[in-house]
Image (cartoon, coloured by chain):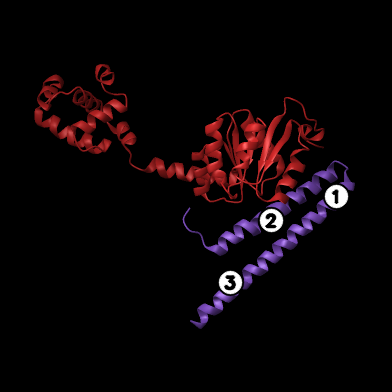
Amino acid sequence: MGSANPVAVRIHDRVLGLIGTALMKAELCERLTELGRQDELAPTLLELRDALNQTVVELRGIMAELRDAGLKNHAA
Amino acid sequence: MFNHERETPRSSSNDIRVVLADDHQLFRQGLKALLELERGITIVGEASDGLEVQRVSLEQHANVVLMDINMPIVDGLSATRELLRANSEIGVIILSMHHEEGHVFQALRAGARGYLLKTSRVSEVAGAVRAVASGLSLLDPTVTNSVVSEFKRMSSKQTPEDGLGQLTETEIKILQHVSAGMSNKEIAQKLSLAESTVKNRLSVLFEKIGVLDRTQAAIYAITHGIAPTAVQSR
């Protein structure tokens, strides 16, 4: 596949992975509701929130890296 | 309201035995919880790297493995190859965030019988598990387009196989005689043609099938099943 850009790798491995997890949790909430198992919703919604929070943290980190790289290029 | 297959899950000995391989524990947990709501599917094991998935799948006699590509120690593609070397009956479905065609082709070359994106709904994943367990193959519609495009690209390329279809009846006969070791003069006599005609026809024929000389042409005829029987069995 060649040597990938480290930012692209991080977006793929971390951000997309977390979004995949969030989608999975959202679908689980949907199914639990269909099955009338609302009592199991709360922990799944918490996990969904965790996955989204981690996504935000990852994206902020990546944006900071890109900003720094942009400033270095600008200064050069 | 519900799909009957999804409404009342119960595990039985006839269930499809599935192993989940992904280094993201939260993703595995979510997928497991959802697949356990499906009738006829039992999760018999989980793995977080490409080495563990081989061991767990063989130990648990898995029918189907849902495999991520990016995993530590051994990646999902190498794990697929190794696992199928140990037991070719296992159906491997790659479940990845990668939608690039390069990954899809590598997965298919490694022996995977399914390729789905992690954004697929679990009903689609369950459908793929059932399809692969019954011996079918399944690709995510998002990646099918790249596969079809690649197939078209390959089909439009000039290959020796394409050349075979372009040969006239006379050229096929000339090729058969070349593969039988006959000279241009002998071929000319046999087909009632001028020797110079045979020579010219041979040049065109070589170009069509992409070979450089009589030896290569003879090998081509043998490998493509158009050489006379006596030559093929030699």
Q: Which residue is mark 3?
A: A66
The correct choice, above or below, for B60 with respect to B181 in the image is: below
Amino acid type at mark 1: Leu
Q: Is residue B225 left or right of residue B121?
A: left
Amino acid type at mark 2: Ile
In this orientation, which residue lies closer to the viewer: A64 or B81?
Answer: B81
Of the numbered discs 3 and 2, the one sitting upstream in the chain is 2
- What chain is tagged by disc 1? A
Confirm whether residue B186 shows in the render: yes
Q: Which residue is mark 1?
A: A41
Amino acid type at mark 3: Leu
| Chain shown in red | B
Under tag 3, what secondary structure? helix
**Is the N terminus of chain B in the top left, top right, bottom left or bottom right quadrant?**
top right
- What chain is tagged by disc 2? A
Q: Are marks 2 and 1 in contact (CB under 8 Å)?
A: no
Q: CA distance from mark 3 to mark 1?
A: 37 Å
The quarter of the displayed image where residue A16 is located:
bottom right
Same chain? Circles 3 and 1? yes
Q: CA distance from mark 2 to mark 1?
A: 19 Å
Q: CA distance from mark 3 to mark 2?
A: 21 Å
Q: Are marks 3 and 1 in contact (CB under 8 Å)?
A: no
Residue depicted at x 78% and y 35%:
B6
Residue depicted at x 85% and y 46%:
A33
| Chain shown in purple | A
